[in-house]
Image (tube, helix red, strand yellow):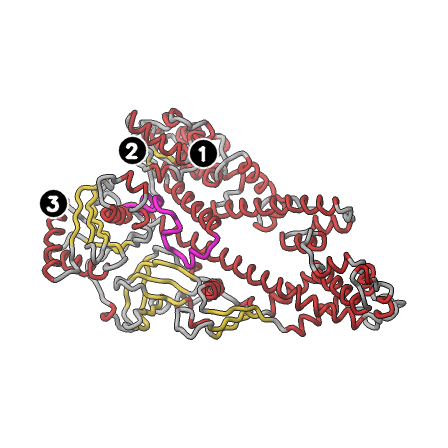
Amino acid sequence: MKTISEIIAGELNREVSHVENVIALLDEGNTIPFIARYRKELHGAMDDTALRTLQERLEYLRNLNERKETVKKSIIEQEKMTEELEKAIDDCETLAALEDIYRPYKPKRRTRATIAKEKGLEMLANALFAQTPDLPEPEILAADYVDAEKGVETVEDALAGASDIIAEMISDDAAIRKTLREFISKNALLVSSADTEEDSVYRLYYDFSQRIDKLQGHQILAVNRGEKEGFLKVSVELDRELALQKLRRAVIVPGSRAMSFVRSAAEDAYDRLIWPSMERETRNTLTEQANEGAIRMFALNLKPLLMQPPVKGKVTMGLDPGYAHGCKVAVVDGTGKVLDTAVVYPTFSEGRKKEAIRTLSAMIRKWGVEHLAIGNGTASRETEQMAVEMLSELGGGQSYAMVNEAGASVYSASKLAAEEFPDYDVNLRSAVSIARRLQDPLAELVKIDPMAIGVGQYQHDMPQNKLEETLSGVVEDCVNAVGVDINTASPSLLQRVSGLNKTTAKNIVLYREENGIFTSRKQINKVPKLGPKAFQQCAGFLRVPESKQVLDNTGVHPESYEAAEMLLTLCGYTLEDVTAGGLALLPSKIKLIGEEKIASECGVGVPTLSDIVAELMKPGRDPRDELPPVLLRKDVLEIKDLKPGMELMGTVRNVIDFGVFVDIGVHQDGLVHISQVCDKFIRHPSEAVSVGDVVKVVVLEVDEKKHRISLSMKQAAK
């Protein structure tokens, strides 16, 4: 029997030793970001995504083994365990297969079959189901089991009870269920019809039928929600006669005197027991698969959103648009510190709009604002038009960007926002958040529940614990990939650092407030409740720009400082050269000496050596700086300005199963259908594009009334 390590290695196409090493590291309490970054030699340089997949499979397989032991114990206690049964249990690769085997032995509530057994009809059922050549007619055999005291008053009663027992035996047969499950997966249809005369967003599914192996995840989730909201009737349909043919082949012995009886019992088993449970199971399986796909899509979309390039060091004005309560305004400096706030009412009248422009223009001049960040929610179109008019009057020098404000209102009303901005109104806090989202999306978005950020589809229908766990993992990976300045980071950001939690993050900030800024990584050890293991996990991801030791402001882990200094010495450099940025020839010198030789002399592996070199070449580097910059605008379009054939630049806002939503600056995002994403065949739009990408599109069609814009990336590339 294969070990868990061997199973996972086969599934992920990895070395068994690498998988074993990762399992050992996880069991020792190491975090995924730490393992991914600082233990590459032990796992063959798997990335954080592969490591999280491994961790997930490890948990599943350990749960499976635990369940196997529980099942074995139960069957042994019933004194029904055999060598064949034990082997079948050991060979199970899924929980579903295991539960099929356990089904006949699982304690049941009283069923028609158990009642029949209580009447002493089990031997009759076994004899009839065996269908041996010497078997008499069922009625003759059943006559011996008539017993009025037991409630079996007639031959018909005896046969009915035997039929119930046989039906349950057939229903509980693991091989039969496996055969039918495979048949259903290739032949069943998911069918939905209208359960109302009212029009709705589910109209596409008012007369819908699709083979279940052809269903898309978004279709399953839409049908589920439509059913839940009372708009749809949904069922799984299968050709009953074809399914019964498979069932009959499995249980009937041709020519037996009991053949007709067993055939009837099999049909009863299918109609009363097998199909209802299989239909439920099929719906559950489809939903689980759709949920898994949707959660993967969330994670895939969240990562590039968090990793959007920051617009660093610029005085920024955040505008949170609104109608009744006006447009909330906040100006923050290059570090995100609030300089000024206001509320203007550009949507009330032309006069109020002019007044708003005067107020905002004065603030822009006073504080030297370079960029405007405009939330993309309610009244954003009018606010954007006002901003363009204002920037034109100011004579240039400033630009604006539309910022996804999903979750801003959740954050502004949170306890965290109240602690951060006790003197500001809830509405003004969201304007600050929008400004900071442009300056440093990652630092601001970590303050918000990932599920409130809104990249994906049907997030409220997902298993919330699984969704939260997955998205939190993405946030953790992004934060640690970028690194965190320990002297400026908020507790929200710090708690996402490998090895830290809410308590230690708050303690870092308290220590900073009481003792002044950190001046070295070693000083982190003085933070209360931050022990040696936590230090090992977090140190490499925390940057200390104010330290005299230049390596403290890099991704080089303290455990590798000696190796880094040895590398510099071997190549004729010092730490001062790192500070001065004078290592241009370092890669060529390493190549001349030999990478493996240097790695050996430094006491590290080649992957770790490569990481050290990358950090020494660009100390304090931010990987987000290497991505395409944010699309900043100076003019505005309206949907009525769009014409088929127009070429525009836009920012990808969401990637879902059937296409890509792109912000082209007209308030309403346009849809690039999957067929218009690129020339080559793709199974999913995420194969070609990510959230935050700046793309060129061609307008295909515009429907002003329905606010629909159809775009093509494929045609723009020609």
Residue 537 circle label = 1
- Local crowd size for mark 2, using a 10 Å CA cut-off: few (<14), some (14–19), many (≥20): few
Q: Residue 89 vs residue 657: left or right?
A: right
CB within 8 Å, label 2 to label 3: no
Q: Position of residue 336 (x, y in %)?
A: 24, 42
The kind of residue on which mark 3 rests is Lys
Q: Position of residue 75 (x, y in %)?
A: 73, 47
Nearer to me, 326 or 83 = 326
Residue position for label 2: 580
The kind of residue on which mark 1 rests is Gln
Does dot 3 land on a helix, a strand or a loop?
helix
Q: Position of residue 572 (x, y in %)?
A: 38, 30
Q: Can residue 122 be seen in the rendering of this structure?
A: no
The C terminus lies in which quarter of the figure? Answer: bottom left
Q: Earlier in the sequence, mark 3 or mark 1?
A: 3
Q: Earlier in the sequence, mark 2 or mark 1?
A: 1
Snapshot quadrant of residue 3: top right
- Local crowd size for mark 3, using a 10 Å CA cut-off: few (<14), some (14–19), many (≥20): few
- Local crowd size for mark 1, using a 10 Å CA cut-off: few (<14), some (14–19), many (≥20): many
**Residue 693 colored in magenta in the image:** no
CA gap, disc 2 to disc 1? Answer: 29 Å
- Residue at image x 71%, y 70%? 267
- Residue at image x 50%, y 39%? 40
Q: Is 238 located above or below residue 445 in the figure? A: below
Nearer to me, 14 or 718 = 14
Residue position for label 3: 366
Extent of the magenta region:
439-463
Q: Residue 72 vs residue 212: left or right?
A: right
CA gap, disc 2 to disc 3? Answer: 36 Å
